Image: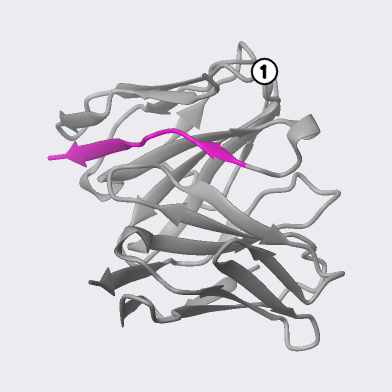
Amino acid sequence: EAQVTQNPRYLITVTGKKLTVTCSQNMNHEYMSWYRQDPGLGLRQIYYSMNVEVTDKGDVPEGYKVSRKEKRNFPLILESPSPNQTSLYFCASRGWSGGEKLFFGSGTQLSVL
Amino acid sequence: QQQVKQSPQSLIVQKGGIPIINCAYENTAFDYFPWYQQFPGKGPALLIAIRPDVSEKKEGRFTISFNKSAKQFSLHIMDSQPGDSATYFCAASQRGSQGNLIFGKGTKLSVKP
């Protein structure tokens, strides 16, 4: 089954404790992206990647890092999480042959205390 | 900053009603306008999309109306059902760039039985 898999689904952590949210897709997609969803603010792009070793900032990149060492994986790293990063995070992917359709993961609800 | 403005923020209709969600954009270079549907606890999923060379597109009970001169597009849901209760996001992107989607802030639709 074609899917984007994020882990963990829920995460509670404390300020300053480094964490990684994993994202993997099994569709051989070139493009991957991270979004955060906050009430009243919609979906805002954090980082995106056009292909392996090619990443770029989205609209709200501060406090986040990403890497794309393999085509299928695109982890999101919070090196020193802060309470304002409490949010619902989504990973998404898209292939060039499939047009512009974005496939989203099921989300990671992060709480930073 | 490129923006897509979506309204209303929330909408309640009776079963069988026709909810309408509106979006307006600023960048005339946008050439792809999708709508995503998100159920609680799930990631957004592509519902329907339109390009500016047509003024209307229908898929089942869902219709996009597009007004290029006004830089507006809207989603109509015919014969709405309780199962349509979800959050709806409009979006826009520009072909030839990275194709990053700019999302509206979302509309929470509730269809009452």
Please tell me whether residue A108 belongs to the stretch shown in magenta.
yes
Q: Residue at x 63, y 20 (%)?
A: A27
Question: Badge 1 is on which residue?
Answer: A28
Residue A63, position as x, y percentages in the image: 40, 39
Is residue A110 depicted above or below B11 in this figure?
above
Residue at image location 53% in from the left, 35% down from the top: A92
In the rendered image of this protein, does residue A52 appear above or below residue B44? above
Q: Nearer the viewer, residue A19 or B91?
A: B91
Residue A79 position in % (x across, y down): 35, 27
Q: Is residue A106 above or below residue A1?
A: below
Is residue B52 located in the magenta-colored stretch of the structure?
no
Q: Which residues are magenta?
A: A102-113
Answer yes or no: is residue B33 visible. no
Rendered residue at 76%/41% (across/down): A99
Residue type indicated by callout 1: Asn
Q: Is residue A97 visible?
A: yes
Where is residue A42? Give x, y as percent.
42, 60
Disc 1 secondary structure class? loop
